[in-house]
């Protein structure tokens, strides 16, 4: 009797356990897999790709992060660590992501070696004298609390990995379908012969967007032509237009204009692209008239308007001013070169700006040879300091803007640029005590 009762309780418990286990497993699968493709996606930020070198340089390295979730993820002060192939060596923190950094849903974040990287503009760049990554090893991502979020081991001698390491035998390693996560690095990553990293300006990619589900009916060999699988012009235009809008939201107007012009080359009657190209200069002119743009933003806005109005001389001259201040501005450097090439093809040379008593002539210079100024730029000498009694509310706001710019430049290690910004701040508000104190402190670091 006792045996029968015990057997009944044992069977009932087993059934109840299996019921809960089935429910739990079902929820997990639904949360991380696609019914269409059968792939599993990560539910957290992942290391989506990386390269340890290129044919040009062993320091041409990057690490790409990706958010495969539908939520914005705050990655402030998250750390990227690396580890070599010696199991006695510990993990080493290589990069700390800046405070305030967030990765929107299905977006990317790019980290690179500033000492040799030659790809898309990185979101965070840092100099690594001896390289960011080894040819074999491990990478991991830690959150603010030091908890491991993701880890990748690559190379046969890797000592720390998920499941099994992946071989590093291509130009780069990329995560399958952006967010695949099976728990095995070897299964999740694939080597690629071409590098195509993404940064925060890249278009969002939904996990599995590159996976093509099997068709219900197999096409005949004759139907499987290049034309039958190539994207149509409408698809290309739509993708490019979304990219243009993404550039617009990021205030990269030249990149936006470049995409809009390509759209009109494919479809001269595209009304949306025409409308945007008409609205861009109108919007910028309004901001310039309201003096909402100052410093670098003012030069950039004037360059955009001049370009769209066909005044390539003024466009090149304003971009040149930006390059003197920030020679590493990738977009400006690229467009300066394009505009110079356009003028050269038309046998034009950029006209020198009119010289005045307090403005020197700016000569055309190649963006490749631009170097940060070691002294004040006489042609850009701000107006004399205003007495405190004459400082308006608008002046105080502009002073605060330049003070904030100086803080960013100083935090990035550009002391001279920071001092220039703070001095401009004092031109608008000579009583700005924080700017004066900041200049004194910055100058001590230069001695």
Image (tube, helix red, strand yellow):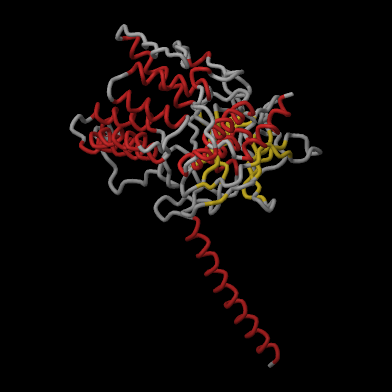
Q: Position of residue 296 (x, y in %)?
A: 47, 29
The residue that appears at 43% across and 14% down in the rendered structure is 356
- Asked if 72 appears above or below 305 in the picture, the reply is below
The extreme bottom residue here reads 1
- Viewer-nearest residue: 165 or 325: 325
Give whichever of 91, 306 is nearer the camera: 306
- Give the quarter of the image for residue 282: top left
Residue 256 left/right relative to 366: left
Residue lying at the far left of the rendered structure: 269
**Relative depth, front residue between 341 and 384:** 384
Residue 264: name its quadrant.
top left
Question: Residue 167: x percent and y percent?
Answer: 61, 33
Q: Image quarter for residue 336? A: top left
Which residue is located at x 57 percent, y 20 percent?
376
Location of residue 97 in the rendering, given as x and y in whole percent from the top left corner = 62, 42
Image quadrant occupied by the C terminus: top right
Q: Residue furthest top?
A: 347
Residue 132 appears in the rendering: yes
Quadrant of the image containing the N terminus: bottom right
Q: List the single residue furthest toward the right.
A: 88
Residue 312, percent from left and from top: 33, 18
Query: Looking at the image, which residue is at 72% across and 37% down?
Result: 83
Q: Please state if 353 lies on the left or on the right of 31 as rendered.
A: left
């Amino acid at each position: 009797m006792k045996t029968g009762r015990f057997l009944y309780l044992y069977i009932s418990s087993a059934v109840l356990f299996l019921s809960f286990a089935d429910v739990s497993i079902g929820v997990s699968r639904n949360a991380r897999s696609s019914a269409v493709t059968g792939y599993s996606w990560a539910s957290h930020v992942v290391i989506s790709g990386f390269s340890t070198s290129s044919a040009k340089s062993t320091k041409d390295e990057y690490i790409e992060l990706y958010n495969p979730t539908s939520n914005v993820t705050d990655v402030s002060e998250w750390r990227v660590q690396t580890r070599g192939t010696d199991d006695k060596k510990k993990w080493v923190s290589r990069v700390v992501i800046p405070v305030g950094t967030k990765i929107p849903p299905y977006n990317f974040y790019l980290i690179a070696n500033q000492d040799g990287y030659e790809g898309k503009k990185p979101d965070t760049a840092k100099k690594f004298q001896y390289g960011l990554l080894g040819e074999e090893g491990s990478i991991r991502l830690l959150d603010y609390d030091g908890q491991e979020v993701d880890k990748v081991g690559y190379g046969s001698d890797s000592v720390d990995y998920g499941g099994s390491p992946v071989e590093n035998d291509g130009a780069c390693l990329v995560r399958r379908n952006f967010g695949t996560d099976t728990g095995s690095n070897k299964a999740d990553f694939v080597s690629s012969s071409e590098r195509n990293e993404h940064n925060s300006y890249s278009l969002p990619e939904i996990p599995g967007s590159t996976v093509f589900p099997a068709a219900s009916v197999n096409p005949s060999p004759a139907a499987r032509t290049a034309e039958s699988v190539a994207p149509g012009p409408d698809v290309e235009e739509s993708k490019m237009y979304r990219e243009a809008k993404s550039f617009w939201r990021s205030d990269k107007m030249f990149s936006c204009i470049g995409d809009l012009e390509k759209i009109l080359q494919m479809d001269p009657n595209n009304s949306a692209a025409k409308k945007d190209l008409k609205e861009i200069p109108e919007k910028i002119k309004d901001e310039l008239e309201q003096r909402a743009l100052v410093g670098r933003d003012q030069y950039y806005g004037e360059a955009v308007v001049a370009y769209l109005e066909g005044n390539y001389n003024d466009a090149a001259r304003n971009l040149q001013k930006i390059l003197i201040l920030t020679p590493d501005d990738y977009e400006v450097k690229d467009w300066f070169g394009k505009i110079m090439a356009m003028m050269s093809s038309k046998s034009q040379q950029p006209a020198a700006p009119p010289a005045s008593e307090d403005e020197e002539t700016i000569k055309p210079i190649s963006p490749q040879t631009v170097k940060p100024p070691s002294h004040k730029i006489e042609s850009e000498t701000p107006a004399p300091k205003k007495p405190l009694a004459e400082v308006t509310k608008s002046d105080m706001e502009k002073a605060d803007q330049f003070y904030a710019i100086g803080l960013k430049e100083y935090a990035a290690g550009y002391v001279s640029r920071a001092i220039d910004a703070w001095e401009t701040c004092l031109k608008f508000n000579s009583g700005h005590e924080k700017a004066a104190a900041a200049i004194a402190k910055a100058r001590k670091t230069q001695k």
